[in-house]
C-alpha cells in the first residue's frame, strides 16, 4: 500500500538513517530491503585535550601565503557578504560525498535557513585572499549553555587546496571555541572524505558511525 502511494506521487526511493550501534534498527531496515549506501563516522574532540600551541605554525603558514582568516561577524551583514558566502557554499557542496545530487536553494530561502534563532555569525570562519573568498568552516552551538558545539561544512576552493587553508580554518575555529569555554565538539564525515582525516589529525576520535540507507520504490 505504502509503495503504491509513493509511486503515485512520483517518489522513486525512501531514505532512512541509523547508527552502527543500533543493530536492531539495522536488521529491521535490511529485512525491509533497505541498502546501506554511505557511512559517516561520528567523531568528537575533547577540547580540554586540544593544545592550540601545537598548531600555531598552521596559522602562520597561511598568513604568510596571503590568506586572511575572518568570521562572518567580522565581515558584516551586507547582501554582498551573504552573496559571496552563498556562492562559496554552493561551489564547495559539489565536492561533498553524498548518494544523490544537491538541489540549489534560492538565495533568500538559503539565508533564512541559516539565520535561525541559534545562529551565531562568530562561529562561521572564512579564508579570504584579496577579495576572493577561498574557503570556510562552520560551527554551531548544540545547546544554550555553549558547552557542546557541532560542525557544518568545511571546504576550500580547488585552486587553493593542499596549502593548509582547511587546517588553519579548523584550528582557528577550535581555538575560538576552547577560549569561549566549549568542552566538546562533534562532527561527522563520509568515510573517504579528506576532512575526516583532518579531524583525526586534530585529535577527534570516533564514537561509531551514521549509516545512510535507501530503499528503491518499485
Image (cartoon, helix red, strand yellow):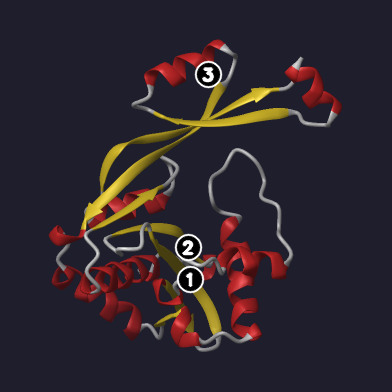
Query: Does 111 sit above or below residue 201?
Result: below
Residue at 26% in and 72% down: 58
Question: What is the crowding at mark 2: few (fewer than 14 residues within 10 Å), some, or many (at least 20)?
Answer: many
Residue 97, image x and y in percent? 53, 45
Q: List the residue tagged with mark 2.
A: 155
Say which residue label 3 marks.
29
Q: Nearer the viewer, residue 35 or 140?
A: 140
Residue 126 occupies quadrant: bottom left
* 128 relative to 215 in the view: left or right: left
Q: Secondary structure under badge 3? A: helix
Which of the two discs, 3 and 1, labels the residue nearer the N terminus? Answer: 3
Observer-side mark, 2 or 3, equals: 3
Distance from the alpha carbon under mark 2 to that under mark 3: 33 Å
Q: Secondary structure at mark 2?
A: strand
Q: Earlier in the sequence, mark 2 or mark 3?
A: 3
Tag 1 residue = 135
Report the residue at 25% width, 64% height from top.
182
Q: SS of the residue at dot 1? A: strand
When the figure is inspected, residue 42 is found, relative to residue 199, above or below; the finding is above
Instruction: Report the front residue among 132 and 86.
Output: 86
CB under 8 Å between discs 2 and 1: yes
Residue 152 visible within the image: yes
Assign the C terminus to one quadrant of the image: top right
Amino acid at each position: 500500500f505504502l509503495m503504491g502511494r509513493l509511486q503515485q506521487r512520483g517518489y522513486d526511493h525512501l531514505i532512512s538513517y541509523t547508527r552502527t550501534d543500533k543493530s536492531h534498527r539495522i536488521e529491521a531496515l535490511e529485512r525491509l530491503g533497505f541498502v546501506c549506501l554511505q557511512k559517516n563516522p561520528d567523531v568528537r574532540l575533547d577540547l580540554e585535550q586540544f593544545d592550540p600551541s601545537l598548531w600555531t605554525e598552521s596559522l602562520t603558514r597561511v598568513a604568510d601565503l596571503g590568506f586572511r582568516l575572518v568570521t562572518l561577524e567580522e565581515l558584516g551583514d551586507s547582501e554582498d557578504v551573504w552573496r559571496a558566502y552563498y556562492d562559496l557554499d554552493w561551489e564547495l557542496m559539489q565536492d561533498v560525498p553524498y548518494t544523490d545530487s544537491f538541489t540549489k536553494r534560492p538565495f533568500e530561502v538559503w539565508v533564512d535557513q541559516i539565520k535561525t534563532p541559534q545562529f551565531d555569525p562568530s562561529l562561521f570562519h572564512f579564508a579570504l585572499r584579496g577579495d576572493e573568498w577561498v574557503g570556510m568552516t562552520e560551527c554551531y552551538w548544540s545547546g544554550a549553555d555553549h558547552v557542546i558545539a557541532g560542525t557544518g561544512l568545511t571546504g576550500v576552493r580547488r585552486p587553493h587546496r593542499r596549502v593548509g587553508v582547511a587546517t588553519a580554518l579548523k584550528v582557528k575555529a577550535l581555538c575560538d571555541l576552547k577560549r569561549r569555554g566549549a568542552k566538546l565538539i562533534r562532527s561527522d564525515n563520509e568515510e573517504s572524505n579528506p576532512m575526516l582525516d583532518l579531524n583525526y589529525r586534530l585529535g577527534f576520535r570516533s564514537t561509531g558511525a551514521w549509516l545512510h540507507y535507501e530503499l528503491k520504490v518499485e
